[in-house]
């Protein structure tokens, strides 16, 4: 279990942008069954409607932690 001092070092990646959902019947089973088998317990297979593949082609990302509360507007953004 994290201690109070180690919890302050956790970082969160926040990403904004336009999401593009991909309907690729070959890619979805490959990702869920071969490339990312650790996701299997979280869903019900490639045909489960809540399992979706998406990408964000353009947007911004930044890292923040507990020490950045109320200062997110000051953090460096990475544009992609």
Image (cartoon, grey):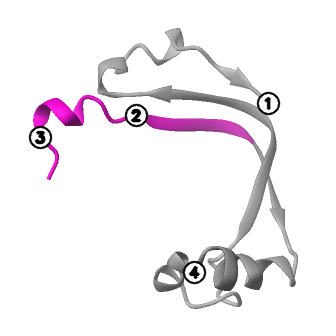
- Badge 3 element: loop
Disc 1 to disc 2, C-alpha distance: 20 Å
Q: Residues within 10 Å of mark 3 (few under 14, many from 20)?
A: few
Quick check: 21 above or below 24?
above
Quick check: 11 above or below 68?
below
Which quadrant is the C terminus positioned in?
A: top right
Disc 4 to disc 1, C-alpha distance: 28 Å
Quick check: 8 above or below 20?
above
Disc 2 to disc 3, C-alpha distance: 15 Å
Is residue 3 shown in magenta?
yes
Q: Residues within 10 Å of mark 1 (few under 14, many from 20)?
A: few
Disc 2 to disc 4, C-alpha distance: 25 Å
Q: Residue, x 87% and y 83% (percent of image)?
A: 26
Instruction: Give left or right: position of 46 versus 18.
Output: left
Is residue 5 shown in magenta?
yes
Q: Is residue 49 visible?
A: no
Contact, mark 1 vs mark 3 (Cβ under 8 Å): no
Which residue is under mark 3? 3
Quick check: 35 above or below 75?
below
- The picture places residue 40, in percent across and down from the top left corner, at 53, 84
Which residue is under mark 1? 80
Disc 1 to disc 3, C-alpha distance: 34 Å
Q: Residues within 10 Å of mark 4 (few under 14, many from 20)?
A: few
Q: Nearer the viewer, residue 7 or 55?
A: 7
Label 4 vs label 1, nearer the camera: 4
The disc placed on residue 37 is 4
Q: Residue furthest top?
A: 74
- The picture places residue 49, in percent across and down from the top left corner, at 67, 83
């Amino acid at each position: 279990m994290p201690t109070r001092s180690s919890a302050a070092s956790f970082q969160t990646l926040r990403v904004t942008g336009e999401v593009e959902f991909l309907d690729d019947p070959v890619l979805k089973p490959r990702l869920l069954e071969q490339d990312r088998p650790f996701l299997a317990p979280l869903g019900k297979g490639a045909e489960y409607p809540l399992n979706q593949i998406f990408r964000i082609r353009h947007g911004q990302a930044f890292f923040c932690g507990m020490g950045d509360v109320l200062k997110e507007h000051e953090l460096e953004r990475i544009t992609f």
